[in-house]
Each structure stands twice: as C-alpha cells, then as structure tokens.
C-alpha cells in the first residue's frame, strides 16, 4: 500500500509538470515546430521541403532552412536575409 502511494504521488507530480508545459508555451510567441509548406532557404537559396524541423518564425512568417548552420546564420542577422 505504501509503495502504491509513492507511485501515485510520483505520477501525479509528473502529470502536473507535463500538463503545464503547453500552457507555458502558448503564453510566449507562437513557434511552429515544422515547416508548413515547401519553401526556400533564405540564407543559401536551397529548396526546403515541408516538415523540416529547421524553422524559424520571424515577423509572422515562417522560414525553413536546409540545416542547422543556415538557421543559426539567420538567427544572427535575420534582416540581412529577409530583404532579398
Ligand atoms: Zn541553407
């Protein structure tokens, strides 16, 4: 019985932590995790297929990248690549 209570308490704590995560995220800026449609990498010009996880939401527009390197370059100076 004692073991069951410990297990229950642990699961309850885990549930609270897990359940609160989406709420915390919705308070911040909406960040899409995958690219919604085929696009173009603004840094190197490569075509990017939808579903990639290398995405960045910038000024309400979603940008996809071919890889982590391009995404990081974009993060450093987004204006440089957007104005093209
Ligand atoms: Zn690229």
Image: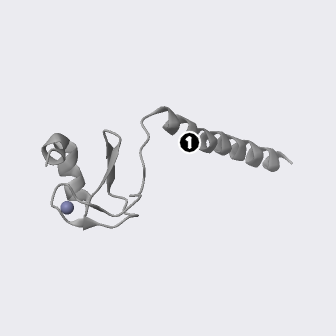
Observer-nearest of 28 and 11: 28
Observer-nearest of 13 and 67: 67
Residue 1 picture location, percent across and down: 86, 48
- The answer to whether residue 81 is left or right of residue 11 is left
Residue 25 higher or lower than 73, as above or below: above
Q: Quadrant of ligand 1?
A: bottom left
Residue 60 picture location, percent across and down: 35, 41
Residue lying farthest to the top in this orientation? 27
Image quadrant where residue 50 sits: bottom left
Observer-nearest of 64 and 15: 64
Observer-nearest of 67 and 82: 82
Instruction: Determine which residue is flagged by label 1.
Output: 22
Residue 22 higher or lower than 54, as above or below: above
Residue found at x 44% / y 40%: 30
Residue 69 picture location, percent across and down: 20, 57
Total number of numbered discs in the rendering: 1
- The answer to whether residue 52 is left or right of residue 6 is left
Residue 39 picture location, percent across and down: 30, 61
Image quadrant where residue 12 sits: top right
């Amino acid at each position: 019985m004692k073991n069951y209570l410990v297990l229950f308490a642990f699961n309850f704590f885990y549930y609270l932590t897990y359940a609160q995560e989406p709420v915390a995220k919705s308070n911040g800026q909406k960040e899409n995790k995958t690219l919604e449609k085929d696009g173009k990498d603004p840094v190197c010009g490569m075509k990017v297929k939808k579903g990639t996880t290398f995405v960045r939401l910038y000024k309400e527009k979603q940008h996809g990248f071919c890889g982590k390197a391009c995404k990081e370059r974009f993060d450093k100076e987004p204006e440089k690549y957007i104005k093209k």
